Image: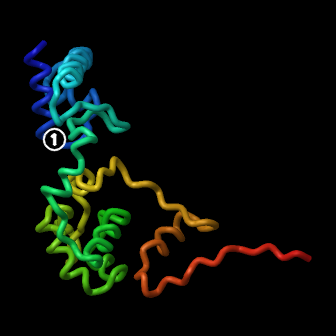
Amino acid sequence: MPGLATTIEAILYLKGQPLDIGKLAELARCDREDIEEGLIELMNEYAHRDGALEIVETLDGYCLQLKERYRFLVDLLIPIDLGVGALRTLAAIALKGPISQTDLVELRGSGVYQHVPELVAQGFVRKRRQAEGRSSLVQVTDKFYQHFEIDQLPQLRVKGATPAQVDDTVLENEDEREPEVPEVESAS
């Protein structure tokens, strides 16, 4: 079994994202029961060693990650060098993606043409040509989820809006947004 625990460790390290038991079994070419035993052994090893990494179970599966007490090192050693506009574009891609670059320009403005190459260069966004049409699709990468410590993006909810309305209104250019005014009940 030590060989399987090491194989699981290598898979989790190389994939860099949570994997469920079924996917781990497929990649390790063994059955689910063996993976469960290997995971228990591996998690036990990590729990008893005084290292910076740990194996944890998330909603999406098991992953190898940095222990919480060392997370400050991520920003210290791997600083993010993005301006506010690029960060807002990244947020739009994360929430709406995969999204065509044309739609992203409509949503965020022409600054997207500078932001996307910068986000691709930093590894937060992947850009690929669509089979049809001229515009490329952009979407966030695993690095985005790891750097910002996000397992999954929440569903956006706007008070009183249908899901279709949320899709159309949530990420407008901030200049065009009207401030939200709370509803006031009349005292008649």
Residue 114, image x and y in percent?
18, 81
Q: Nearer the viewer, residue 134 or 52?
A: 52
- Dot 1 crowding, Cα within 10 Å, few <14, some 14–19, many 20+: few
At 91% from the left and 77% from the top, the residue drawn is 188
Disc 1 designates what residue?
15
Amino acid residing under circle 1 = Lys
Q: Secondary structure at mark 1?
A: helix
Residue sitting at x 10%, y 15%: 2
x, y percentage for residue 18?
Answer: 26, 39
Q: Residue 84, relative to residue 3: is it above or below?
A: below
Q: Position of residue 35 (x, y in %)?
A: 22, 20
Q: Quadrant of the N terminus?
A: top left
- The foreground one among 184 and 140 is 184
Residue lying at 14% horizontally and 65% vertically, measured from the top left? 122
Q: Quadrant of residue 180?
A: bottom right
Most extreme residue toward the top, as rendered?
1
Q: Is residue 161 left or right of residue 175?
A: right
Residue that sits furthest to the right in the current view: 188
Applied colour scheme: rainbow
Residue 154 position, x and y percent, is 44, 54
